[in-house]
Amino acid sequence: MAQTNLPHASFDPSAKQVPPELIGGKILWAHPDGYFLNARGQKVKHNFSPCEQRYTKGSCYPTMRHFGSKSCHSLMCIAFHGPRPQGYECDHLNGVITDYRASNLQWVPPAENRRRAKILRAMRAAGLEPSTYSRDELLAIFGKYDVGDPHAVMLHDMTHHMEC
């Protein structure tokens, strides 16, 4: 995807343009820190869309209402990680659905997304907050543990993070 000219000289070069064909031909830039900029370099506010509630069991994903009502996390994931592979979902690595920093998002199959959610719930139940872990730490945890593993074994390994 070729980027168009940046809106002005002070525009952050780490921002990537969201493909205009996904958002009705409009210009929108995604910043890796999890916010969006319009063509003038101004931050764009997101909206909480009640139509998403059925998918998230009562919580709402932030959407870009004026940009085709696409979810913020999907637009961010597309901008930084490429088009969504068929059958994949955008996973929030730390489980916080309003954290759509590029480093917190990843395309995964639905079954993997659910498996990771169970691991995150087990961590929270043990008093560990996944949002305090780095991307690499979370990916290592997801790669090492299966949902069927005894929580005591998994959490014993993770308590080192709390002690540091």
Image (tube, rainbow, N blue to C red):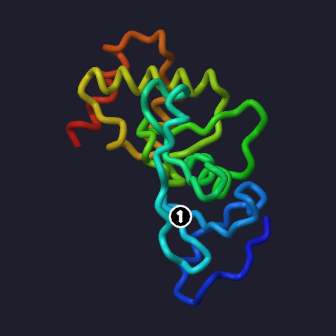
Q: Amino acid at mark 1?
A: Phe
Q: Position of residue 158 (x, y in %)?
A: 32, 29
**Of 39 and 123, the residue lying toward us:** 39
- Which residue occupies 56% across, 37% down? 91
- Which residue occupies 67% across, 52% down? 78
- Which residue occupies 62% across, 76% down? 39
- Which corner quadrant holds the N terminus? bottom right
128 in relation to 150, above or below: below
Q: Is residue 46 left or right of residue 163?
A: right
Secondary element under disc 1, as helix, strand or loop, is: strand
- Which residue occupies 74% across, 72% down? 3
Q: Position of residue 100 (x, y in %)?
A: 49, 50
The residue at which mark 1 appears reads as: 36
Q: Is residue 79 left or right of residue 48?
A: right
135 in relation to 53, above or below: below
Q: Position of residue 163 (x, y in %)?
A: 20, 38
Count of numbered circles on the image: 1
- Which corner quadrant holds the C terminus? top left
Furthest-left residue in this view = 163
Q: Is residue 33 left or right of residue 16?
A: left
Res 110 → quadrant? top right
109 in relation to 102, above or below: above
Crowding around mark 1 (Cα neighbors within 10 Å: few <14, some 14 to 19, many 20+) is many
